[in-house]
Image (tube, rainbow, N blue to C red):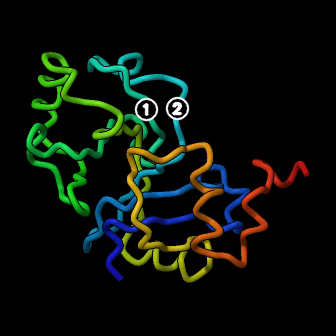
Amino acid sequence: MKMKGKLLIASPHLLTDAYFSKSVIFIVDDNDDGTVGMILNRPLLYRLSEATSLGGDFQLFHGGPVEEDHLYFIHKIPEIIPGGLPITGNIHFGGDFDQLNKNLKENSGLFSDVNIRFFVGYSGWAPGQLQGEINENAWFVSDLIIDPFAVNPGTLWRDLLPRVAPEFALWKNAPDNPELN
C-alpha cells in the first residue's frame, strides 16, 4: 500500500511509547527505500528564529526521532520554493533551501503558518517496517483530508482517533502517561 499523503494515527497500543504516544504523522514520502513522515502534533518550545540562523517567527515541530539535528519543512508555495517533492494536492516536502533562506530574509511576508511548517527531525521506517507496525495494530492509516497547516496540535489526536477507530473512542481522553493513572 502506498502511503504518501496519508495520515498515521497512533493507536492506544502506543500510549507508553516515548516518541509516538498520541501522535499523528503526515506521510511525506514512501518509496522502495522506506517511508518518511512528520509528526503534526509535537510543537517545540522554541521558534525557528531561536533555533536557526533563518529568519521568521515560525513554530518549530518535532518531526520524529531520526536526524533530530536537521531541519525539514512542508509547504504550499512551490512557486516560491521550487524543487520540493509533491505529496498531495499543492503540498510539497522540502525544496530549494537557498531560495527558502533568501525569501525568508528578503520577503518574510510571503510566508505564514498557513503555508509552511518546519520540523526538527523526521519519522522514518525501513522498507516493510511500517507495514509490520500497522499489522501489529500500532497505527491506524487514514485517507482523511486535513490541512496540516491548520490543525490544532493540542487536540489533533483526540479529534482524529474516534473518526478512524470508533471502537477506541474512549481512549481519546487517556492521560499522557497511563502508567501513572
Taking the spot 65% from the left edge, 50% from the top edge, the residue there is 18
Q: Is residue 110 left or right of residue 118?
A: left
Residue 44 is marked as 2
Residue 139 location, quadrant: bottom right
Amino acid found under the numbered disc labelled 1: Leu
Q: Which residue is mark 1?
A: 60
Q: Which mark is residue 159?
A: none
Q: Residue at x 8, y 43 (%)?
A: 79
Q: Position of residue 35 (x, y in %)?
A: 35, 66
| SS at circle 2 | strand
* C-alpha separation, residue under disc 2 versus residue under disc 1: 6 Å
Q: CB of mark 2 within 8 Å of CB of mark 1? A: yes
Q: Is 27 in front, or is 167?
A: 167
The answer to which of 77 and 125 lies nearer the viewer is 77
Mark 2 surroundings within 10 Å by alpha-carbon count, few (fewer than 14), some (14 through 19), many (20 or more): some
Residue at 55%, 73% in the rendered image: 140
Q: Quadrant of the N terminus?
A: bottom left
Q: Nearer the viewer, residue 22 or 79?
A: 79
Residue 135: x and y in percent read: 56, 83
On screen, residue 153 above or below 7: above
